[in-house]
């Protein structure tokens, strides 16, 4: 194989690894978000686990985080949480999830 082909395969492997890692980070973040919102909503363990799954599924609606944000915003509409508070918490929990994969 030529060095160009080697580099190409190396970049493809790195890209695949990075995508898989980002997927895992997002899934972990969504779990944390589900736990946070469940606590605010006063859910018991069974309902909390169902809600976490709902948040994880919501993330598959479209690329990016807006689908999760909209779900959380809707679910917390009666709890006086601002968009900024929700986004800040999402960022905080994303960093927490990211730190677990270092």
Image (tube, rainbow, N blue to C red):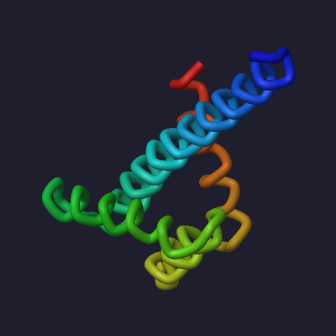
Q: Nearer the viewer, residue 44 or 9?
A: 9
Residue 73's place in the image compared with 18, above or below, is below
Q: Is residue 41 left or right of residue 59?
A: left
Q: Nearer the viewer, residue 49 or 79?
A: 49
In the image, residue 68 lies at what x, y percent?
54, 68
Q: Residue at x 61, y 53 (%)?
A: 89
In the image, residue 8 lies at what x, y percent?
78, 29
Q: Nearer the viewer, residue 2 or 83?
A: 2
Q: Residue at x 33, y 59 (%)?
A: 52
Q: Name which quarter of the figure residue 36 lies in.
A: bottom left
Q: Residue at x 13, y 59 (%)?
A: 46
Residue 65's place in the image compared with 28, above or below, is below
Q: Residue at x 61, y 54 (%)?
A: 90
In the image, residue 76 lies at what x, y percent?
48, 76
Q: Is residue 71 left or right of residue 64?
A: left
Q: Quadrant of the N terminus?
A: top right
Q: Nearer the viewer, residue 7 or 94?
A: 7
Q: Is residue 20 left or right of residue 46?
A: right
Residue 102's place in the image compared with 49, above or below, is above
Q: Is residue 58 left or right of residue 46?
A: right
Q: How many marks?
A: 0
Q: Residue furthest left?
A: 46
Q: Quadrant of the C terminus?
A: top right
In the image, residue 55 lies at what x, y percent?
40, 65
Q: Residue furthest right?
A: 4
């Amino acid at each position: 194989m030529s060095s160009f082909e080697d580099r190409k395969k190396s970049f493809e492997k790195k890209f695949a690894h990075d995508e898989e890692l980002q997927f895992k980070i997002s899934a972990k973040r969504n779990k944390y978000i589900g736990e946070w919102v469940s606590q605010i909503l006063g859910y018991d363990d069974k309902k909390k686990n169902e809600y976490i799954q709902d948040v994880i599924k919501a993330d598959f609606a479209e690329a990016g985080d807006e689908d999760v944000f909209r779900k959380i915003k809707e679910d917390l509409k009666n709890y006086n949480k601002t968009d900024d508070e929700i986004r800040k918490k999402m960022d905080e929990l994303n960093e927490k999830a990211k730190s677990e994969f270092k």
